[in-house]
Image: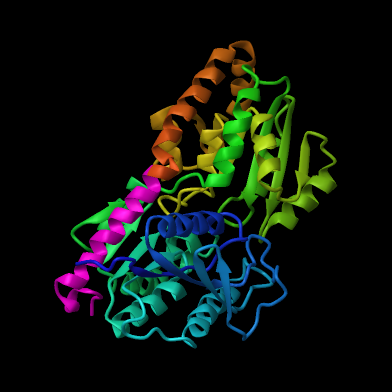
Amino acid sequence: MLPKRPRILVVVNVFRPDLGGGVLFADLCDGLAASGFDVTVRCAYPYYPQWRDISGQNGLTIRTEKHGELTVERFGLYIPSNPNSFLQRLIYEASFYLSLSRRPIRKGQFDAALVFCPLVGSVAWATAAARRAGIPLWLNVQDFSAQAAAAGGFASTTGWLERIQNHFFRKAPFWSSISEDMVSVLKSIPDSPDEIHLIPNWLHTSLGTLIDQSVAQRPNRPHQPVRLLYSGNIGGKQNLLAFCQKLAQLETPFHFRIHGEGGRADEVRTWIAQSRDERFEMRDLTDESGLVDALTSSDLYVITERPGSGSSFVPSKLIPGMTSRTPILAICDPDGPLGREVTDYGIGTRLDWNDLERLNGIFASIAQDPQIWRSWSENARRRSNFYSRERGIARCVQALERILSLNQVDPDTLTKE
């Protein structure tokens, strides 16, 4: 029999109030607690996406907090002053592993563990800790560290980073990821599990509620000039500065509003100030209410991926874009998760980096025939149902119930050698 209230350890680098994945992971843990699980989270002090110590408490102290029904344990880590430095990123990963190692888990303390990757340091610690404690481990791959390094401009490191990454992946018996493309990449890893589960991310509760309240205010035709929006992390993978520079070459009028932070946000901010191109506007990241207002008053939601990113990640910003019925303007490879999502489901338009002059025609066509834009918007609404919170939490509960059953079978299957 499974425990009445199974004790789950969740290991992740970012957590509420961190944005991006931090919001999603917190929402997942809230959902698991509401579904009858006793959840403990081990994470870092808040730092993302600003890449600085937001709480002012990052350091050696391990702090325990209560977030509703959740127990949250904060561990200090090295925060890179330059997230684009490969050496600093390695120290960042290693520091989290060493920091987590200061508090081992005991046998009988938890019934199962869930670790999120993109940090291999998190995965390395969780695999060792789960094996010592004799509990099953669930690996959820949100991003591939090795491929993300290549997308960020460190292509020469991909080979040996991938070997290290895959070594620790193979120590977990239960794998899942967030898109079909990423599942396919995982299946190509030698000695991967026979079954790898698809568990897409979803729109968290508070943002979903705000969007539901505001979406009726959206105009039924695009503005003139067209309004573009970018909101989120600005790093090497997004290559946003290059997009802005190419966009500035267009003669067509537009307004591009950017809300962002991250390792390369200052580059974009400086370029906009120096270019004096009034079509560009950059602001800090906004709260959820501000994001919803920006989405519902924009015509195209811009998501950029550096060429060669391939299947390394699915942008979390795609889901609020679709749910708010804002068509997506994706600048990315055609065969990655983002490119296929936009093309297969008709939720906007996708362009190659060397084909951005086509934007002149796209802006003109949606102005002359707003039905094109309306069709994208309606397709986005329909596709967003696939990413509903209820379905996402249910998938995760089913996954945990399945992995908890491993405890009832054979202790040697809990983690792999």
Task: Identify whether 344 is placed above or below 244.
Answer: above
Q: How is the image coloured?
A: rainbow
Q: Residue at x 37, y 47 (%)?
A: 179
Q: Residue at x 57, y 32 (%)?
A: 212
The boundaries of the magenta stretch are 391-417
Residue 14 visible from this viewpoint: yes
Q: Position of residue 64 (x, y in %)?
A: 57, 77
Q: Position of residue 402 (x, y in %)?
A: 23, 60
Residue at the far top: name it: 368
Quadrant of the snapshot with the C terminus: bottom left
Residue 353 visible from this viewpoint: no
Dominant SS of magenta comes to: helix
Q: Position of residue 109 (x, y in %)?
A: 36, 80
Q: Is residue 397 magenta?
A: yes
Q: Is residue 396 magenta?
A: yes
In which image quadrant can residue 345 be found? top left
In which image quadrant can residue 246 be found? top right
Q: Position of residue 81 (x, y in %)?
A: 69, 72
